[in-house]
Image (tube, rainbow, N blue to C red):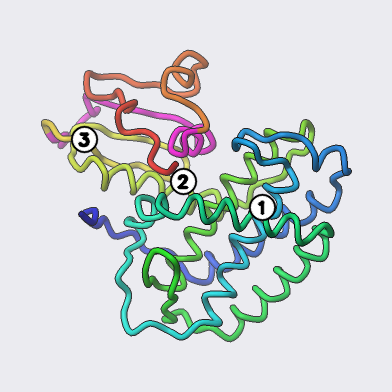
């Protein structure tokens, strides 16, 4: 059953710039990795850093591949449906990642080609362009918002895997990723009894129960963007976040553990 939509507009120009900027940050960092660093394990099962880096390139190249396909007649996949629509394709994505990493030992060349193709395809694509992707048909801007999620989440994975790497986060990419995952929570658990605050990027109301109308909400969850992203994608669990004081939760309806992760 598709989620009830909570419409948030995303500036097409800013989203395009965010994807390009974050991919550029990752490309520069990947170019510095040694063979020993590329062989390090990641928190993504059996993937090495090399495979994770290849996967990031693949998720961005998906924009160019989609723009090369025929345009569908109409969109049938809303942005807020995307987080729940990707799970059936996880095995295919993992297989594609392993094949890509094996076929492209020169990651610098892979990233250069991916960046050049993205720039070329986006320059020719109108904002209204529809894309045919695995999970359905969606607008170019919406698909680019999902690429900010892929880029930000996997930038965090790379930073966790390689000590001292510290790839920066483009502010607009981090904002778009945070907002999409917050909106997906509100769609998953519609209601107005709990306020989730992720300053400076998002505030959403969710969870069934008495609706807050004025004053201080009785149920409040607050955290920072990266902690929220880790919670929403299963990189951190609720108990760990509370114990490490990475999230504050007050009120009887402020326990979100049964609603997380949003994207896995």
* Count of numbered tags: 3
Q: Residues within 10 Å of mark 3 (few under 14, many from 20)?
A: many
| Mark 1: secondary structure | helix
Q: CA distance from mark 1 to mark 3?
A: 39 Å
Q: Is residue 153 magenta?
A: no
Q: Is residue 230 magenta?
A: yes
Residue where numbered disc 2 is placed: 178
Q: Is 141 displayed left or right of 116 in the figure?
A: left
Q: CA distance from mark 2 to mark 1?
A: 28 Å
> Quadrant where the N terminus lies?
bottom left
Which residue occupies the foreground of this view, 202 or 46?
46
Residue farthest to the top, as pictured: 243
| Mark 3: secondary structure | loop
Mark number for residue 258? none
N-term-proximal mark, 1 vs 3: 1
N-term-proximal mark, 2 vs 1: 1
| Mark 2: secondary structure | helix
Q: Is 208 displayed left or right of 78 in the figure?
A: left
Q: CA distance from mark 3 to mark 2?
A: 18 Å
Boundaries of the magenta span = 211-234
Which residue occupies the foreground of this view, 64 or 249?
64
Q: Position of residue 107 (x, y in %)?
A: 80, 58
N-term-proximal mark, 3 vs 2: 2
Residue where numbered disc 1 is placed: 98
Q: In this picture, is 166 found above or below 136?
A: above
Residue ID at (78%, 67%): 112
Residue where numbered disc 3 is placed: 207
Residue ID at (88%, 43%): 34
Q: Position of residue 163 (x, y in %)?
A: 77, 31
Q: Residues within 10 Å of mark 1 (few under 14, many from 20)?
A: some
């Amino acid at each position: 059953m598709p989620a009830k939509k909570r419409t948030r507009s995303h500036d097409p120009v800013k989203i395009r710039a965010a994807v390009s900027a974050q991919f550029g940050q990752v490309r520069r960092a990947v170019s510095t990795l040694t063979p020993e660093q590329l062989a390090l394990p990641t928190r993504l099962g059996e993937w090495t850093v090399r495979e994770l880096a290849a996967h990031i390139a693949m998720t961005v190249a998906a924009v160019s591949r989609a723009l090369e396909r025929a345009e569908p007649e109409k969109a049938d996949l809303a942005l807020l449906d995307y987080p729940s629509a990707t799970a059936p394709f996880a095995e295919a994505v993992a297989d594609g990642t392993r094949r890509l990493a094996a076929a492209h030992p020169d990651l610098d060349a892979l990233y250069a080609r991916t960046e050049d193709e993205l720039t070329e395809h986006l320059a020719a694509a109108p904002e209204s362009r529809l894309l045919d992707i695995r999970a359905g048909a969606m607008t170019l801007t919406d698909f680019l918002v999902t690429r900010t999620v892929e880029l930000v989440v996997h930038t965090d994975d790379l930073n966790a895997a390689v000590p001292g790497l510290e790839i920066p986060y483009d502010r607009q990419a981090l904002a778009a990723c945070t907002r999409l995952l917050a909106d997906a929570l509100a769609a998953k658990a519609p209601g107005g009894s709990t306020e989730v605050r992720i300053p400076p990027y998002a505030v959403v109301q969710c969870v069934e129960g008495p609706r807050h109308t004025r004053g201080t909400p009785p149920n409040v969850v607050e955290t920072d963007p990266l902690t929220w992203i880790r919670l929403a994608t299963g990189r951190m669990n609720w108990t760990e976040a509370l114990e490490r004081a990475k999230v504050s939760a007050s009120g009887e309806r402020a326990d979100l553990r049964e609603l997380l992760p949003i994207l896995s």
